[in-house]
Image (spheres, rainbow, N blue to C red):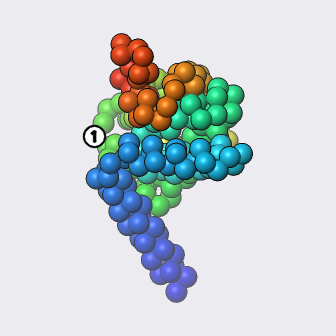
Amino acid sequence: MRTSSTVRIVVIGVVLLVVLATAVALLPVREILISLLGRIESVGGWGPVLLAGVYAAACVLFVPGSVLTLGAGFLFGVVRGTIAVSVGSVVGATTAFLVGRTLLRGWIEKRIAANPRYQAIDRAVGKEGFKIVLLVRLSPVFPFNLLNYAFGLTKIPLPQYVLASWIGMLPGTLMYVYLGSALKSLAEVAAGTPSDDPLHTVSSCSVWW
């Protein structure tokens, strides 16, 4: 009976996550995120905490984090914005890692089975887990959200994964939060471009968290 209940919970969890990810793919994500940033701006001191929570959920649901990262800089400045995004991205990446290691293991294996880049990462992680995760986090070549789940299939210990991910993501987080702090409105955050500088387009850069 316990096994049957566990299987049922796992199946429901997988179906729910897939439905949510599909819905995200079909929705006007950028507009929704800008609306969320507007609400976060209105809650005052709890704003960074709320943004970190939204960011963590975005990581799990395969939502690109560029708008939220720029928005954090715009709303809270470099220091608080970087802390909020860093916490949210690490929590989200860790959650996806654990889900990939448990609930979605079979689905993730199918997604990455034919990709030689992930196969190479898997082999390398078996030898130099911390170093490989750190180096991959520094590179925009690999999709951040799927990689969170993919690392769950490797043998890297959770503490090493969390620490390497945090260190590797921090430079890019700091850079894009700083760029966001230079923007003057949520409209500019949505466009990724300061209204008085049409040649400076942030959204065209590779933001993988």
Let me know if residue 92 appears in the view. Answer: no
Let me know if residue 84 appears in the view. Answer: yes
The structure residue drawn at horizontal position 59% and vertical position 44%, both measured from the top left corner, is: 41
Residue 63 placed where, x, y %?
Answer: 42, 45
Residue 80 placed where, x, y %?
Answer: 68, 33
Which residue type carries mark 1?
Ala
**In the rendered image, which quarter is residue 84 located in?**
top right
Seen as rendered, the residue at the extreme bottom is: 1
Seen as rendered, the residue at the extreme right is: 45
Disc 1 crowd rating (10 Å Cα; few below 14, some 14-19, many 20+) is few
The structure residue drawn at horizontal position 32% and vertical position 56%, both measured from the top left corner, is: 22
Left or right of residue 61: residue 130 = right
Residue that numbered label 1 is attached to: 114
Mark 1 residue element: loop
Is residue 86 positioned above or below 109 on the image? above
As rendered, which of 198 and 70 lies closer to the eye? 198
Residue 203 placed where, x, y %?
Answer: 39, 26
Left or right of residue 44: residue 75 = left
Q: How many marks?
A: 1
As rendered, which of 186 and 89 lies closer to the eye? 186
Left or right of residue 83: residue 154 = left
The structure residue drawn at horizontal position 35% and vertical position 23%, both measured from the top left corner, is: 204
**In the rendered image, which quarter is residue 23 located in?**
bottom left
The structure residue drawn at horizontal position 58% and vertical position 30%, both measured from the top left corner, is: 73
Residue 79 placed where, x, y %?
Answer: 69, 28
